[in-house]
Image (tube, helix red, strand yellow):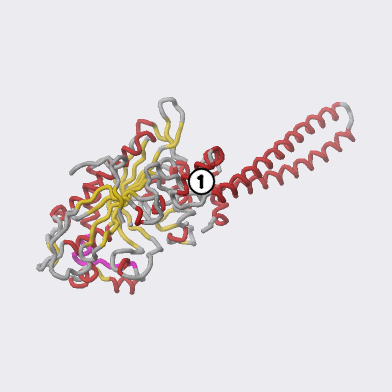
Amino acid sequence: MQKIALGSVKDEKSSPNEDNEQRFLLTLRIITKKTKNMLTLKQLRDDKELAIARLAKKGVDAAPIIAKIEELDDKRKAIQAELDNCLAEQNKAAKQIGMLMGQGKRDEAEAMKQQVAQLKARSAELSADHQKAQDELQAQIVLLPNFPSEIVPEGRTAEDNVVVKLVENYSELPENPLPHWELASKYDIIDFDLGVKLTGAGFPVYKGKGARLQRALINYFLDCNTEAGYQEVEVPVMVNEASGFGTGQLPDKEGQMYHATADNFYLVPTAEVPVTNIFRDVILDEKEFPVKMTAYTPCFRREAGSYGKDVRGLNRLHQFDKVEIVQLALPEKSYEALDGMVAHVEKIVASLGLPYRILRLCGGDMSFTSALTYDFEVYSEAQKRWLEVSSVSNFESFQANRLKLRYRGADKKTQLAHTLNGSSLALPRIVAALLENNQTAEGIRIPEVLVPYTGFDIIK
């Protein structure tokens, strides 16, 4: 199959964040006190108009936030200047007290001590004010998303995304093909009602060959990834606030994550969060790149979308299985790594024999953290619609800045790495498409590459 350099391929037009700052003031003080700003303060102040223009591509009106950032930064600087003067007065007075005591001028020395006490009290007040201003400044900065790459298309919705590749590998189906939720019931392989009984909507129960197919897909995807040089890791499915903050889910996606309040842990929305955070506060050597990892986790997302056929069955769930790939790359090689990740995911999707297309997302349809994203969609012939099964993204240094993930080059200086991740793959919509596109009068055929993993070639 042809490998495409997605950064330069010719585009063709195609059809398809709440203020949590108060909650995170204390958290930000802990996490970011030794971290550079997410979009650096220098970036925002030195070229404000450019920052506003680039963030506008993501549909963000950054002007009011940047104005607030400038106001808070000026306030912080003014407090810092007064604090510095106050501390200098203290030091000067302390020296004068020693001189006065040496000259036997005890009364004057005592008066000077009173002055120092007042200066110390004022310094304490200013220090507290400075910390508050710094926290408020950080809380505003983290509301701003990552800058989109130069090649991100203009647009506000999925309708403005750009198709960069289309493979029309359609199947011949029986007359009046069934959608996957009816096939699941017919062959008794997925029970949506039982999931509602046990938990609620969006938590299906896989049974028999349906459960075996899930396990087969997970193992197949992991094998494909490890054969391509990704190290498999098994990670927790609950993370702390620092991890959620590091990869950009917090504070941006707080309302969409399941929160275990007693321990202040979050259920992972994707393996990207714990896997990337393995390298939080780590300095790597330039020779260690690229770092390539893969992991399987169940994923949990509170937002299941609206009602109707577009979210019926497996189309959108609160809990689902996904295999993820993550890369850490040198800045000058991260877009080459992105192309490689896209080609790798494409190879897996193609091996399943499904019709698919690759989209370059427009600014308004991109995530908070991404600089450039490619989505993979497979076609559901029974539903007559495209289903997203993977997103592959380059975050450049945005996550690394929050994670304090750096590397040391040959010149011994440290700088931020680039992070990337991709679904390889998300199971629910892959299963939906496999069931629908492979239905026959005899049953549901299993793609040849999966038979060694399932142990059967048809679901009857």
425 vs 306, nearest the viewer: 306
Determine the secondary structure under disc 1: helix
Disc 1 residue crowd, few under 14, some 14–19, many 20+, Cα 10 Å: some
Q: In the rendered image, which quarter is residue 181 located in?
A: bottom left
Residue 117 is one of the magenta-drawn residues: no
Residue 404 is situated, as x and y percent measured from the top left of the image, at: 47, 40
Q: Horizontal placement of 172 versus 409: left or right?
A: left
- Return the residue found at the far left: 442
Residue 203 is one of the magenta-drawn residues: yes
Q: Horizontal placement of 242 versus 207: left or right?
A: right
- Residue drawn at 57 percent across, 52 percent down: 25
Q: Horizontal placement of 87 versus 396: left or right?
A: right
Q: Quadrant of the C terminus?
A: bottom left
Height in image: 104 above or below 378?
Answer: above
Q: Quadrant of the N terminus?
A: top left
Q: Is residue 240 visible?
A: no
- Residue drawn at 46 percent across, 32 percent down: 414
Residue 368 is situated, as x and y percent measured from the top left of the image, at: 44, 51
Residue 26 is situated, as x and y percent measured from the top left of the image, at: 57, 52
Height in image: 218 above or below 286?
Answer: below
- Return the residue found at the far top: 411
Q: What's the residue type where badge 1 is placed?
A: Ile
Please count the marks in the image. 1
Residue 244 is situated, as x and y percent measured from the top left of the image, at: 45, 52
73 vs 384, nearest the viewer: 384
| Magenta region, residue range | 202-213
What residue sits right under mark 1 in the picture? 52
Q: In the rendered image, which quarter is residue 44 located in?
A: top right
Q: Is residue 113 visible?
A: yes
154 vs 177, nearest the viewer: 154
